[in-house]
Image: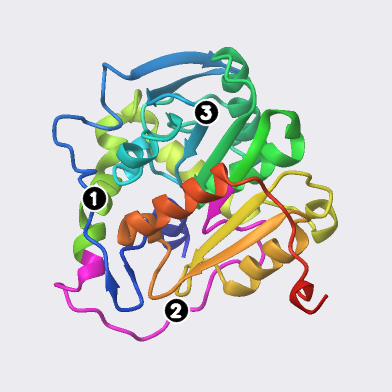
Amino acid sequence: MKKLTVLILGCIFALATWGQTKFTVPAAQDTTIAYGSNSAAGNYVNVNDIKVYYEIYGEGEPLLLLHGNSGSIENFIYQIPELSKHFKVVAVDSRAQGRTSDSDQEITYALMASDMAELIDKLKLGKVNIAGWSDGGNIGLELAYAHPEKVLKVVAFGANFTHENWMAPPNSVVMAPDDPLIQKSSEIMQKFMTSSKRLSPDTLKIPIIKKKLENLTEKYPNFTPEQLKTIDVPFLVVAGDHDLISLDQTFALFTNLPQSQLFIVPHASHLAPAEYPELINSIVTRFIKTPYTDIDPYYFFK
């Protein structure tokens, strides 16, 4: 179960057909750019007790991209090319993952949010938008709670607010190897499975880090609905209709955040940004660029 848990929260990917409408995978596969290993865009910054690796693309309002458990910047190969046309994309390897170092501290979402808050200050980004996938969404939630003065809006894909009862039950569906969703997510999954050995600054610590990341999913996050109600930051809560995160928890996150919108992607898993990249990129752009307003469910009768 622990191995499954780490795989689940690290697999932050998903979306590419809406109903019967077909989308092609965008040319995110620009083979001239090695996202996650691009020396022309990458740099390091000392944050708290670690050295954080990040890459910057594009110009405009800053958008912080945060990957999932055991992932890296590489997970956003379908997002960075398109989103960097609209925003200053700051893609980050989280603590102990990708090219970012670790320390002796226990890894928590609150600690990783503190890392990002200091990174925002060190890079002089001011207030940022956040697009977080899985664990990245959890970090975005912590940032909005503890450091709302640094956050404009948050898009959370497949995020959970409590470690209790977060996992959707398995089913018996068997997908063919040539299923379009498998084809679209395969490159990201291949990189995900090998990222620690290829990117870690200290491969000897990989077993220790793996255990720490397992413990993270078993003990955190620990938000209560009452705490969620105090978060004064606009959220777009996104999940696949067949996400690894239970829809009950997704709906609870949406209903308890005071400023929130909900987007459930049909025929999608936890890997929606890889399965349906054009759709995901478009809703992220629209949400960030559109001024947030609440809606009255009965406005058209008034």
Region of the chain picked out in magenta, as a range: 155-182
Q: Magenta stretch mostly in which secondary structure?
A: loop
Residue 111 appears left or right of 104: right
Mark 2 lies on residue? 170
Circle 1: is it few (<14), some (14-19), or many (20+) Cα within 10 Å? some
**Residue drawn at the location 53% of the way across and 60% of the way down:** 238
Mark 3 lies on a secondary structure that is strand
In the image, residue 259 above or below residue 73: below
Gap between marks 3 and 1, in whole Å? 22 Å
Q: Position of residue 278 (x, y in %)?
A: 33, 55
Q: Which residue type carries mark 1? A: Pro
Q: Residue furthest bottom?
A: 172
Circle 3: is it few (<14), some (14-19), or many (20+) Cα within 10 Å? many
Mark 3 lies on residue? 62
Mark 1 lies on residue? 26
Q: Earlier in the sequence, mark 3 or mark 1?
A: 1
Q: Position of residue 135 (x, y in %)?
A: 53, 48
Q: Which residue type carries mark 2? A: Pro
Q: Which residue type carries mark 3? A: Pro
Is residue 173 one of those drawn in magenta?
A: yes
On residue 162, the disc is none
